[in-house]
Image (spheres, rainbow, N blue to C red):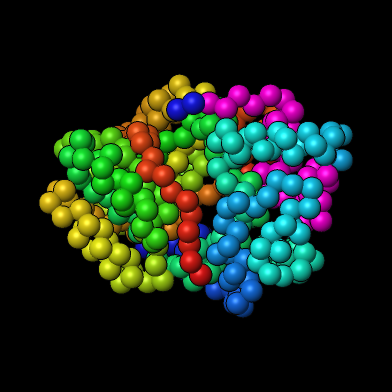
Amino acid sequence: MNRPAGKLTETPVVTIDEIDRKIINGLQGGFPISPRPYLDAAEKLGIEEQELITRLARLTDTGALSRFGPLYNAERAGGAVTLAAIEVPQERYEEVAALVNAHDEVAHNYERTHTLNMWFVLAVEDPEDIERVNAVIEEETGLKVLNMPKLEEYFLELKLEV
Amino acid sequence: MQVFELDDTDRRIVVATQDGLPLTPQPYHTIAEELDLAPDEVIARMSAMLDGGAIRRMGVIPNHYALGVRANGMSVWNVADERAAIVGPKIGALAFVSHSYRRPRHLPDWPYNLFAMVHGKTRADVEAHVKEIADLLGEDDLGHEILYSTRILKKKGLRLSSGGLSSRDPSTKRT
């Protein structure tokens, strides 16, 4: 099958050293909201303020970090998010992907290994838009959309160890 | 879920920081200057957003793929609904699980009601982790599968514009 864009294996692995590792493992939460936050955080990590700033800049530039700063919670900020899945016949896959992706409300869309082979995330301002957008996608594609909103979250603090 | 009410000033702060904090020694002062606010006000409002849950956390957002954590499996589980609240937090607490949610079933197509994203360097790692979850669940595991992502069809950040939440490309953000 032709897979032109977005292949997951294309991202190169970034090399990091021990101090980078300490920063990534130690700063996944709890970065201070204070007048000199880099100084406060650097002291805890046992490095200099300027070194922390320089390393965060490099880790962001090289792509080791997607971002540094606040991670906002879309739902708490008043919007709504859902996960939805479609079983797409292989021969229609690209066509359906284009139809789904054309909606601005579709934030992410992934091909996955299952008969339900297309999984997308809708993010909307008004919670009622979820039903409306899913209905439009069903109408445009002629396929059934399974809506799987989060009913409960079993709390997670990101703890990726690198 | 309780909604943290953002006012216009909060929204301006969100828009100014959602791509990241300035890498200046006094980042909140830098934001304050950009937005013509007092630094104390930026600090107070961001602290309130963190306490109220509008900010989930403050810190680094690692890029799993770039750091070599390349196998990411969406493990999905069928557990009795009344057991979900008991086993869900146990799964969420595992070091290799980044998200764990209860979601609705769609019978007969989709019997699974518990989702856990499992991360590892290889698919074999992911499978070993899923086995650990299965062992943890024991008789509560009424069936599970792992779905791997094979292609990103679309990915853009969730963005707040001055008008509200939207999911749009950074290049087309409204201000």
Residue at x 15% of width, y 55% of height: B138
**Side of B90 where A54 appears, left or right:** right
Judge by depth and name the residue closer to the eye, A81 or A34: A34
**Side of B116 where A107 appears, left or right:** right
Query: Quick check: can you spot residue A37?
Result: yes
Judge by depth and name the residue closer to the eye, A102 or B97: B97
Residue B23 position by quadrant: bottom right
> Total number of numbered labels?
0
**Side of A121 where B147 appears, left or right:** left
Residue at x 27% of width, y 50% of height: B76
Q: Is residue A135 magenta?
A: no
Q: Is residue B16 magenta?
A: yes
Q: Position of residue B10 (x, y in %)?
A: 70, 30
Q: Is residue A140 above or below residue B67?
A: above
Residue B53 position by quadrant: top right
Q: Quadrant of the N terminus of chain A?
A: bottom left
Q: Position of residue A105 (x, y in %)?
A: 52, 35
Q: Is residue A155 above or below residue A140?
A: below
Q: Position of residue A31 (x, y in %)?
A: 65, 52
Judge by depth and name the residue closer to the eye, B20 or A81: B20
In magenta, the rendered stretch is B3-31
Residue A66 position by quadrant: bottom right
Query: Quick check: can you spot residue A61?
Result: no
Residue at x 40% of width, y 25% of height: A131
Q: Position of residue A106 (x, y in %)?
A: 49, 39
Q: Is residue A36 above or below residue B63?
A: above
